[in-house]
Amino acid sequence: MRLPTVSIVILNHNYERYVGEAVASALAQEPDEYELAEVVIVDDGSTDASPALYEEFRNVRIVNQRHQGFAATLTRAVREASGDWFAPLDADDSFVPSKLRTVAPHLRDPDLLFIQHAEHVIDADGRAFAEGSHPGGSTSTLLVRTSAARDLLPVTNELLFHVLADLGHGVRLPDLLTRYRVHAESMTDRRTPGVFSKYLAGVYEDVATRLTDLAAQPPRWATPDQLLGLSRSYRLQADQKRRLAATQRRTARTDHTRTEASA
């Protein structure tokens, strides 16, 4: 029986400090009942020393594009994947060596389209940033059957892949298989009150719109009613995030005013 194949695709824009670790972790995956079809780097117009670092690695395919942002890079990553499964990896994160070996039994399930696993959270220097187990859900903690990922294109955020789990085609594993890095150069601002919630509201709205579009010509793994119902759910979540963002901004302004008054 043919082994399931996996494409690890690394998404990079100006992460020269971390990308070498990401590539090394992809190449260091422990063997098991799967085949690592390829390791690909989609470089989103990096202007730092990243391209020079790529030359240190053999058997890695480089795909260069002008800078277009995360959405276009993630969409390009799916299109570049040739394996049965697509394993995205943000260039500032890394995989533990046992990642693909651990998920290998699930890769053989013909009804499964989506795998999510837990993560270690680390800081810029690789030290533990948060205690306990974290369930993951971000780009580097997912594997998606490539054919299903292509059904969803174009994507603006990895949240769209979670639709597959929402519709009963996914599994969530407790294993900590990714080192997820939190640092000042992260693409999303999680420190300014209201900014991240507003960002999520936009993501949820994008997912809702994409699901409505898909309902017109649904993929084999969903019905129009399922897609439209899920679209309504994501629009409600978008509204909730917008309200939360407004509350966070008001609270921050109130706290700032009180601090100035007491100074």
Image (tube, grey):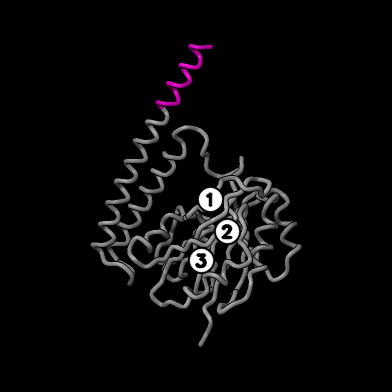
Residue 163 spot, x, y in % from top left: 37, 60
- Within the magenta stretch, is there residue 236? no
Q: Tell me the tag on residue 132.
A: 1
Is 60 left, or right, of 231 in this rendering? right
Q: Nearer the viewer, residue 119 or 51?
A: 119
Q: Which residue is mark 3?
A: 79
Image quarter in which the C terminus is found? top right
Is 7 left, or right, of 15 in this rendering? left
Q: Nearer the viewer, residue 48 or 175?
A: 175
> Which residue type carries mark 1?
Gly
Mark 2: which secondary structure? strand
Q: Nearer the viewer, residue 247 or 65?
A: 247
Mark 3: which secondary structure? helix
Q: Magenta residues, as a range? A: 250-263
Res. 30 image quadrant: bottom right
Image point (37%, 53%), residue name: 207
